[in-house]
Amino acid sequence: MANQLWVKKPIEKLLKESTGEENQLKRSLGSASLVALGIGAIIGAGLFSLTGIAAAEHSGPAVTISFILAAVGCGFAGLCYAEFASMIPIAGSAYTYSYATMGEFVAWIIGWDLVLEYALGAATVSVSWSRYLLEFLSKFDIHLPAQLVCSPFEVVKLSDGTIIDNGIVNLPAILIVFLLSLLLIRGTEGSAFLNNLLVILKVTVVLVFIALGWSHIDPQNYVPYIPENTGNYENFGWTGIATGAAVVFFAFIGFDAVSTAAQEAKNPQKGMPIGILGSLVICTVLYILFAHVMTGLVNYKEFLNDAKPAATAFAKTGYDSLQTALIVAILAGYTSVMLVMLLGQSRVFYSMSKDGLLPKFFSQVHPKFSTPWKTNVFFMFFVSIFAGLVPVSDLGHMVSIGTLFAFCLVCVGVWMLRVKRPDIHRSFRTPLVPFVPIMGIVVCLYLMYSLPIESWYRLAVWLAIGFAIYFGYGKKNSKLGKENNLNS
């Protein structure tokens, strides 16, 4: 039975599952929709919220360099993801790729780890969405009960100086998770249409912010561009830039969510690489320009404990009439991020359930909408618990370390498969193997090292829970494990 831990799912079997009658999911997404799906997942809380935190606590104006460092790590991982997604066009993302290259146990670890990325990623964004909603409502002198707008473990500060604490639960964050989960149950085609509209809106907002803010930049806000290190690894200097990169790394997660929709892509061999790499390149350029303008409008110190830095910075431009429109667009942008995160998570659990590692409940498809609706319902409640009760900073760190870990395993997988299965057709080939996978692993591990030690403790606890579920249920019910035992 020990050999079962390392049993690999044949790639030929994976390819069969992605075609014909084996594929129960509807193929409705073209290349443009896949790029929009990636942008929809990427541009959101990381840019509109965590950029200010990274600048104030870690990088200063050099947060632009943090974005570049994070983008380099994502670029290496993205090239590896693109090869896998074009070669194995099936739902499940890094979980599926690991199953084919490193065996069932590693696949389980990465599948369980992806819950941190997608489910808790959606929870993180929902909390930030709630913050901007409060800011929007306050402009119309509408104030919700303090007990219902934040968790008992955090304090919310609005731009007018209002302090909200003594909360019980973040009800707006819970409600948006419920609404989007119900939308996903109705199908990815309608969800993709809404996502495309939201992507157009929020990219327009980013471009308007850059264009209008550029002429109001105060060069003095860039002095010093790299603040001197305080003596703590995480605070400023070059080490602070590295920590800042690990924090804003959250802003890049999402391009890999494109790979979870592989079974719903019209032409996955072509569309997957375009969706993954196209969305990553577009967002990297926008991020660097956005961060440069934001820290040029406001001194980085003013962003301390500010969960809405984009609104704070834009206020310096004098375009007061556009302030409310900016917040509305950011809310829309956050909505598309949550939509893609919830979609990605449901597809990962769908794949794990199809393999027998999770109960059949998670792979049951709706007879009318052809979506794994029971999984959507499960995560509707699971994500809402974290959204309603956990502070945004703690969620963000957990999501970042989980994502970086997943990226490392994908890079390892591409390298291994090039050695062991060079015969498999690859519509897209990662260049400079093994250099690119090795650099992806090195950069991602370095960013993981730069995160607070508490993030490692939480990751260890999370993995321990995952091990208990695998050995208690997954290993016993694995379809591939059972087939392997019968044949041995």
Image (cartoon, rainbow, N blue to C red):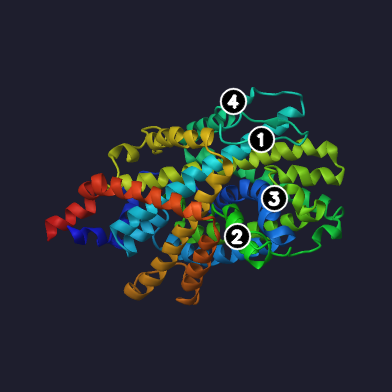
Q: Percent x, y for residue 166?
A: 61, 28
- Residue, disc 4: 148
The amino acid marked with disc number 3 is Gly
Image quadrant assignment for residue 329 = top right
**Height in image: 314 above or below 88?**
above
* Left or right side of 153 for 162: right
Circle nearer the N terminus (3, 2): 3
Which residue shows up at 67% across the image and 54% down it?
A: 57
Name the disc covering residue 52, or none.
3
- Residue, disc 1: 156
Q: Percent x, y for residue 13?
A: 28, 58
Circle nearer the N terminus (3, 4): 3
- Residue, disc 2: 243
Label 4 secondary element: helix
Residue in the foreground of this view, choosing between 106 and 457: 457
Residue in the foreground of this view, choosing between 153 and 327: 153
How far apart marks 4 and 2 lie (CA) works out to: 33 Å
